Image (spheres, helix red, strand yellow):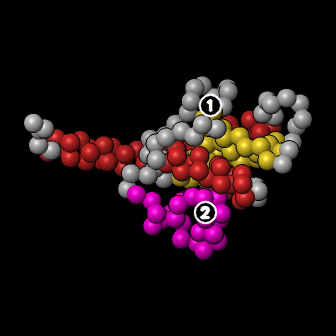
Amino acid sequence: MGFAMLNSSCVLDEYRRNTISLPSEGEMSDTDTPLEFIGASEDDLFEFPQEVKRLIGFALRMAQKGGKHPDAKPLAGFGGAGVLEVVSDFDGDTFRAVYTVKFKGVIYVLHAFQKKSKKGIKTPKAEIDKIKSRLKQAQELYAESDYEKQGQIYKEQRQRVRRSRPAKR
């Protein structure tokens, strides 16, 4: 299908995760949001310089924990803060990773690329088109998945735990 789940058990995937600074299956807590890569985004990210992989990996980890890295900004043209872009400059080059938090219970990494255009900071149209296509793939995957159902179950469990606590005096 062209995507890899974060909890995959493949040794190569584990090596990649460690070089990108993403947690392995055993390091994820029950409250961490799962991370999935669409298309070749994981392979593309793996090709980045180590310093860039660390920054982007940390930004994705913050997203899994419910936060937002200071370098993660909403990508223009996608209607709000549901699609974010992390930009990292390294050795005169600019690297970008785009992910979405639009879907309850999962984060999809849509694209990772090195910006080659020297004309301003605007994201090239070809890259925007690829992001739009992968966002559509993510929507289709989400519709087929049970993340929404799992998110509802988790929410209900948390509400039960909150209700069962004795009142503070």
Residue stretch rendered in magenta on the structure: 1-29
Instruction: Report helix, strand or loop for mark 1.
Output: strand
What residue did someone put label 2 on? Answer: 17
| Percent coordinates x, y for residue 160 in the rendering | 20, 45
Q: Nearer the viewer, residue 44 or 17?
A: 17
Instruction: Report helix, strand or loop for mark 2.
Output: helix
16 displayed left or right of 67: right
What residue did someone put label 1 on? Answer: 74
Q: Nearer the viewer, residue 138 or 95?
A: 95
- Which amino acid, by three-letter code, is at mark 1? Pro
The quadrant in which residue 151 appears is top left
Say which residue appears at 43% left-offset and 52% top-offset: 32
88 displayed left or right of 14: right
Residue 137 in sight in this render = no
Mark 1–mark 2 Cα distance, whole angstroms, equals 24 Å
| Percent coordinates x, y for residue 122 in the rendering | 79, 29
Q: Residues within 10 Å of mark 2 (few under 14, many from 20)?
A: some
80 to 86, vertically: above or below: above
Outermost residue toward the bottom in this view:
11
- Which amino acid, by three-letter code, is at mark 2? Arg
User: Which image quarter is the N terminus in?
Assistant: bottom right
95 to 2, vertically: above or below: above
116 displayed left or right of 19: right
| Percent coordinates x, y for residue 110 in the rendering | 65, 45
Outermost residue toward the right in this view:
118
> Between disc 1 and disc 2, whose residue precedes?
2
The quadrant in which residue 45 appears is bottom right
16 to 125, vertically: above or below: below
Say which residue appears at 52% left-offset and 65% top-offset: 24
